[in-house]
Image: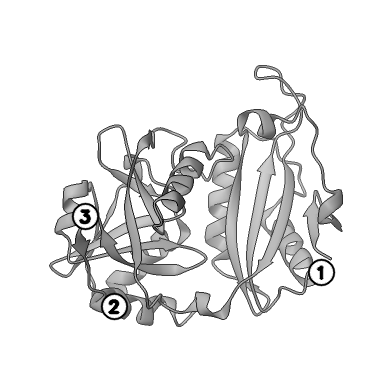
Amino acid sequence: MVYVNQNGKIIKETTASISVNNRSFRYGDGCFETMKVIDNKLLFANYHFERLFASLALLQFELPNYFTPDYLHQQVLAITQKNYHQKLARIRLMIYRGDGGLYDPQNHFPNFLIQTWDLNPANNKLNENGLIVDVFSDAVKHADTYSAIKSNNYLGYAMAALWAKKQHINDAILLNPFNRVADATIANVFIIKDGIVKTPFLSEGGINGVMRRNLLEKLPLIAIQIQETTLTVEDLLEADELFLTNSIYGIRWVKRLKEKEYGNNMTALIFNKIIEIL
């Protein structure tokens, strides 16, 4: 039996429901966090809740006094324990507005739904078989005020993921309106060139990733230079190494983009010094 936490009530997954007039269902009105639990500890909890509450403010939710990071943290751990997923799990916390039309929401209350899934222990290791990725050109990731939010409006990423599956590749890279790299379907994009790690500015349209933030803070502490910059597909093809990051996998090494083959010496070093110790 699988349980979910819907607005503070732990119920069977099969009984959870939303109204047909729900604004998130209709318009993608809301946001989410994907988090990782190891040994009953929520990794990077402060980063996740800081990003979440910044997103809720930007999306004009009206929060009741009890609706705090500590409250949501407790709700996450409660459903993790109910599903016996304390050892190693993926958590999805979705916030969504209630019913209403496009111009007349009934209210701005932050409804929430928390789901949990077991993770394979191999998830905690650097992938030995490098990913195969390519560029998805049918959707553009807009670079605007909302582009860094993990929005419930996920259509471009969803189509890119379906395309990647049909191409028998592992992930797809999305470009912004300026034909530069934004991010991948579920990850931020990093390259290594001449010993320098580079990733796109958030203004390029990518998600404000938790693991991205972690690397920006931690790499200088181990004497590895990292730069936020702009990246083109040509930059990716000229790089020495390419890797993707998110809060679930940490770092995933990319073996090939188009005809370009990449090594992983420095990627493995970064994983061992920053990710594996988690």
Q: Residue at x 39, y 37 (%)?
A: 141
Q: Is residue 268 left or right of residue 263?
A: right
Determine the image quadrant of residue 80: bottom right
Residue 272 drawn at (x, y percent): 37, 82
Comparing labels 2 and 1, the label whose residue is closer to the camera? 1
Query: Is residue 102 depicted above or below 236 in this figure?
Result: above
Q: Residue at x 26, y 75 (%)?
A: 264
Residue 55 in sight? yes
Q: Amino acid at mark 3?
A: Leu
Q: Secondary structure at mark 1?
A: helix
Q: Nearer the viewer, residue 246 or 12?
A: 12
Residue 185 in sight? no
Q: Secondary structure at mark 3?
A: helix
Residue labelled with disc 3? 236
Residue labelled with disc 1? 82
Q: Is residue 20 left or right of residue 120?
A: right
Badge 3 crowding class, 10 Å Cα cut-off, few under 14, some 14 to 19, many 20 or more, is some
Residue 3 drawn at (x, y percent): 81, 61
Q: Amino acid at mark 2?
A: Ile
Badge 2 crowding class, 10 Å Cα cut-off, few under 14, some 14 to 19, many 20 or more, is few
Which mark, residue 260? none
Q: Residue at x 59, y 40 (%)?
A: 152
Residue 237 drawn at (x, y percent): 18, 56
**How is the protein colored in the picture?**
one colour
Comparing labels 3 and 2, the label whose residue is closer to the camera? 3
Q: Is residue 118 left or right of residue 217?
A: right
Which mark, residue 222? 2
Query: Is residue 191 depicted above or below 204 in this figure?
Result: below
Q: Earlier in the sequence, mark 1 or mark 3?
A: 1
